[in-house]
Amino acid sequence: MKKAEKYMQIERMEDKMVWTKKINKQLNDFLTKYNLSDIEREELKEWVKSGSGPYDNPYYICDENGYCCNYIEARRFIEELYDEFYASNNN
C-alpha cells in the first residue's frame, strides 16, 4: 500500500469518528429536549444508527415555513395522516 493511500484511509477513519461523535451528541441533545414514547425512542436510535441525524427525516417532510422537520416531527405527521385516513374510511 502506498503512503498516500494509507494516509487517505486514516483520514477517512478520522472523519467517520468525528461524524459519529457529532451525531451521538445531536442524539443525546435531542433525547433530552423531546418527550418521546419508547417506540419513538427506539425508532430514532435505529435511524441514527443507520447513519442519519435526528434532525433529518426520510420522507423529506417540511413544516409550513419550508424547513425540514426532524425525524420525530415527520414520524408524528405521517402517523396523524394515517390515523385520519383510516378514521375517515371507517365511517
Image (tube, grey):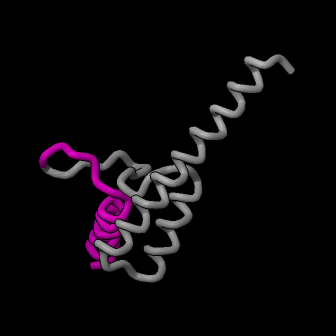
Quadrant assignment, res 27: bottom left
**Quarter that holds the N terminus:** top right
* Residue 39 coordinates in the image, percent (x, y): 48, 78
Whether residue 66 is situated above or below residue 9 in the rendered picture: below
**Quarter that holds the C terminus:** bottom left
* Residue 7 coordinates in the image, percent (x, y): 71, 26
In the image: residue 56, left or right of residue 7: left
Name, please, the residue furthest toward the bottom: 38
* Residue 3 coordinates in the image, percent (x, y): 78, 19
Name, please, the residue furthest toward the right: 1
Whether residue 48 is situated above or below residue 31 in the rendered picture: above
Q: Which residues are magenta?
A: 65-91
* Residue 69: in magenta span: yes
Q: Residue at x 36, y 66 (%)?
A: 29
In the image: residue 65, left or right of residue 76: left
* Residue 48: in magenta span: no
Q: Main secondary structure of the magenta part?
A: helix
Q: Residue at x 29, y 72 (%)?
A: 33
The residue nearer to you, when weighing 52 against 29, is 29
* Residue 86 coordinates in the image, percent (x, y): 34, 72
Q: Residue at x 44, y 50 (%)?
A: 58
Q: Residue at x 71, y 30 (%)?
A: 9
Whether residue 76 is situated above or below residue 14 in the rendered picture: below
Could you tell me how many numbered marks the image carries? 0
The residue nearer to you, when weighing 76 against 90, is 76
The residue nearer to you, when weighing 5 against 31, is 5
